Image: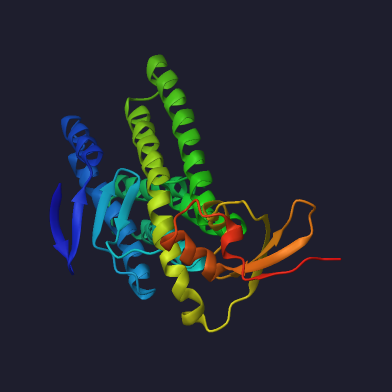
Amino acid sequence: MQIGQIAGIRIVLNPFFLILLGLLGVAGYLPHGLALFGIVFLHELAHTIVAFAYGMPFSSIELLPFGGVATSEGFQNPDPFAEAMIALAGPLTNGFLCLLALAVAPYGVIPAPWNEYFLRANLVIGLFNLVPALPLDGGRVLRSYLALKMGYRRAAERAASLGKILAVCMGLAGGVGFYSGYTNISLPILAFFIYISAGREQRMAGYVFVRYLARKRQELEESGVLPTEQLVAYGDVPVKDIVRHFVPKRYHIILVIDEAGNLAGFTTEMDVVNSFFERGIDTPLQTIVRYRYHVG
């Protein structure tokens, strides 16, 4: 549900956030829910400000019980460092708010129960978001790191899988706790939402990856110089299996070998990307080899 706009950015409340506010209202804790809303909003606003600084303005912010999701219609995979900095902005903001609460506590500026709640809520949201699993901020940092090692597509799938594992563990723990009377139903609900969001991240990975490949064409032109990364493959390997290994901020040279393991030729990242879009994802690598020779 959209509740307004700030500087052209749509502010959307996720249904689970509305449910949480409703439960808090029924229990007589609506002011606490509104305070939580403010904390989550500041968390997500920090992402937006840092993203804007990196030239990535967001089009909408969806507020969730544990943070939020900011989206951009023009999003194309940023460099890993930028994505990590944008992701860390939220938890760092919660950390700053924790320090602020501790700083004002001795002066009684805020009533002690409210200051304690403010401190605890920021601490929980900030630390929970650092868990290295999508869709949490820590998962985005992990994806950025893994993208440099194994490529964006596989990194996204790995981080999203960890998110699903986290959700299942939370759901089981929450179910046992609820049955035993130690916790309320909120933990299993949150686990369900994280599982659904992690699945969405997995499904979106392919779409975002294709957009990332389209931008790959511009990477060298924008950077001027890029370090090289070499891959070795047989000529019958389709280009779709090659691009999965492309990592950001590298220019790839693909060495093509024959069945005996001898070097038969080579091709470049640009040839592979062009073939991916123009000839089809199943195009064999051998059809785009630029230079071929036989050893011996």
Placement of the C terminus among the 4 image quadrants: bottom right
Q: Residue at x 47, y 43 (%)?
A: 160
> Picture quarter containing residue 45?
bottom left
Q: Which residue is at the far right?
A: 296
Work out whether residue 223 or residue 29 is closer to the camera in this orientation and state it: 223
In the rendering, at what x and y percent does residue 197 appear? Answer: 36, 41
User: Is residue 30 rendered to the left or right of residue 248?
Assistant: left
Q: Which residue is at the far top?
A: 179
Work out whether residue 5 or residue 187 is closer to the camera in this orientation and state it: 5
Q: Residue at x 51, y 78 (%)?
A: 220
| Figure check: 182 above or below 17 | above
User: Can residue 126 be seen by looking at this rendering?
Assistant: yes
> Picture quarter containing residue 177?
top left
Q: Residue at x 34, y 60 (%)?
A: 107
| Figure check: 20 above or below 108 | above
Work out whether residue 180 or residue 75 is closer to the camera in this orientation and state it: 75
In the rendering, at what x and y percent does residue 271 appear? Answer: 53, 68
| Figure check: 22 above or below 64 | above
> How many numbered marks does the figure carry?
0
- Picture colour scheme: rainbow
User: Can residue 92 be seen by looking at this rendering?
Assistant: no
| Figure check: 8 above or below 33 | below
In the rendering, at what x and y percent does residue 89 appear? Answer: 41, 62
In the rendering, at what x and y percent does residue 184 appear? Answer: 34, 25
Q: Which residue is at the far bottom?
A: 224
User: Is residue 72 rendered to the left or right of residue 147?
Assistant: left
User: Is residue 77 rendered to the left or right of residue 81?
Assistant: left
